[in-house]
Amino acid sequence: MTSSADQTADPLQQLRAHRASIDNLDAILVHTLAERFKQTQAVGALKASHDLPPSDPAREERQITRLRSLAEDAQLDPDFAEKFINFIIQEVIKHHEAARS
């Protein structure tokens, strides 16, 4: 939602402000993904040490369903969210397979 002050501000200033916000959000995404992968690497090590399979299709399906619902609630395209989580899941499985080797 834009205020009347936003509508009268210099468009280049508005652009810089939006881009600064995007840059901050990108940094948050990178740090969040790094933390997520630290956790999944710990899971991979645990699975490897207990000879558990590197993937858990039932959990993956629950996660996809859960994230699609979260995406809908956040007004984000659920198909995009599913593609994104599938990409992450495949990376995690590769890490788990490597930990098992």
Image (cartoon, rainbow, N blue to C red):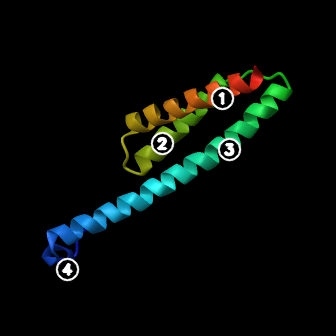
Q: CA distance from mark 4 to mark 2?
A: 35 Å
Is 32 situated left or right of 9 in this image?
right
Q: Quadrant of residue 13?
A: bottom left
Q: Which residue occupies the foreground of this view, 5 or 25?
A: 25
User: Which label is found at residue 38?
Assistant: 3
Q: Earlier in the sequence, mark 4 or mark 2?
A: 4
Q: Which badge, 4 or 1, is on the more N-terminal residue?
A: 4
Q: What is the x, y in percent for residue 101?
A: 75, 19
Residue 5's disc is 4
User: Which one is nearer the viewer's eye here, 1 or 40?
Assistant: 40
Residue 51, position as x, y percentages in the image? 83, 21
Element under disc 1: helix
Left or right, 34 with reference to 4? right
Q: Amino acid at mark 1?
A: His
Contact, mark 2 vs mark 3 (Cβ under 8 Å): no
For the residues labelled 1 and 2, the Cα–Cα distance comes to 27 Å
Q: Residue 1: percent from the left, percent from the top?
A: 26, 67
